[in-house]
Image (cartoon, rainbow, N blue to C red):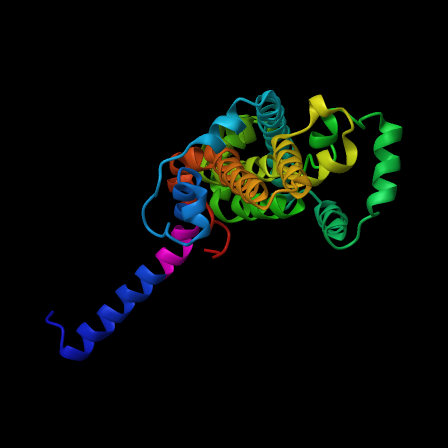
Amino acid sequence: MRQGPADRLITAMVWLLIIAVVLVIIYPLYFVVIASISDQKLVSLGSVVWWPQGFNVKGYSRVLTDARIWTGYRNTIIYSVLGTVVNMAVTMPVAYALSRREFRPRRAIMFLFTFTMFFGGGLIPSYLLYKQLGILNSMWVFILPGAVSVYNVIIARSFFETTIPEELFDAAQIDGVSYFGFFMKIALPLSTAIIAVIGLYYFVGHWNDFFTGLVFIRDYGRQPLQVVLRDMLLTNQTQTGQMLSGKAMQEQQQFADQIKYGAMIISSLPLIVIYPFLQKYFEKGVMIGAIKG
C-alpha cells in the first residue's frame, strides 16, 4: 500500500520521536563511559560530548587496584546469587499455592501479604528484630528479611492462573501426579519466562541494595559493593576539600570525578552484561498476566 505525503510525514515524525527517546535514554550511560576514559580537564570544560578526549584510565586504575573493590564485588555477588535463589525458592511455590482455587485460605493469606505492602514496622523495630534473630552484621540480613516480594508473588500467581491450563492439572491428576509433582514437572518447566523476569527483578534488587549494608552491617569486610564505592567517593571528596592550593584542589577534584565515572561503570557492568541474555524472556514475561484469556 502506497503512502501519501501525510502518511510519510507521520512516519518520519514517529521515527524522529523514537530516535530522540533512544538518545535520551542511552546518551547518559554513553557519556559516563566516554567521560571515564577522558581527560577530566576537557570533561569539565565541556569538550567531551560525543567522543573521548585525552585518553586517561587513571580512574579505573585507582578503582581496580583497591582491594576493597574486590571484597565488595565478592560480597555483592554472593548476596545477589544466594538471595535470588532463596527468593525464587520461596516465591514460586507460594504463588503456585495461592493460584489454586481449591486452596480455601488463599484469599486470607493474600490479604495478609498485601497488607505488608502498605504497612511496615519501621527501621527501629526492624533493627531490634534482626538483632534478636542474630542476623545483624551477617550476610543473612541481606537475604532472609526480603526472602519474598509480595509484588513478585502477585505477578507469578497471575501467571499460573492465566497461563497454565487447568486441563493440564486434570490430566496430571488422572495419571496420579500430586500437587507437588505437577508444580515441579509441569508448572515450572512452562514458567521459564516468568522465572527469568522475576529472577532479574530480584537480582537487580540485591545488586543495588545499599541501605541494608549501610545500616545493618558494621564489619567492613562484609559490606556490599555499593557501600564500598560510596566510601571511596566520600574519601576522595574529603581529600579534595582538605587541599589548600587551588590548582591542587582542581586536580584532585578532577581525579575524584574520574574515579566516580569509573565506579559507575564497574558497578553496573555485570547487569549490562546479563540483561541481553534475559531480554527475550523479559519482553515476553513482563506482560504475563496483564491480559486474561
Q: Measured along the vertical axis of the image, is residue 55 above or below residue 14? A: above
Residue 33 spot, x, y in % from top left? 41, 41
> Can residue 221 be seen here?
yes
- 120 lies left or right of 88: right
> Can residue 170 be seen here?
no
Q: In which quarter of the image is residue 276?
A: top left
Residue 9 spot, x, y in % from top left? 20, 75
Q: Nearer the viewer, residue 161 or 25?
A: 25
233 magenta-colored: no
Q: Quadrant of residue 244?
A: top right
Query: In percent of the image, x 83 and y 47: which residue is there?
Result: 122
Q: Nearer the viewer, residue 282 or 89?
A: 282
Q: Measured along the vertical axis of the image, is residue 103 above or below residue 14? A: above
Q: Nearer the viewer, residue 109 or 238?
A: 238
Quarter containing the N terminus: bottom left
Q: Main secondary structure of the magenta part?
A: helix
Q: Nearer the viewer, residue 43 or 189?
A: 43
Q: In which quarter of the image is residue 238?
A: top right
Residue 155 spot, x, y in % from top left? 57, 47
Instruction: Provide the residue span drawn in magenta.
Output: 21-29
Quarter containing the C terminus: bottom left
For the view shown, which residue lies furthest in the bottom direction? Answer: 6
24 magenta-colored: yes
Query: In percent of the image, x 39 and y 51: which residue is there?
Result: 26
Residue 151 spot, x, y in % from top left? 63, 48
Query: In percent of the image, x 79 and y 53: which residue is there?
Result: 119
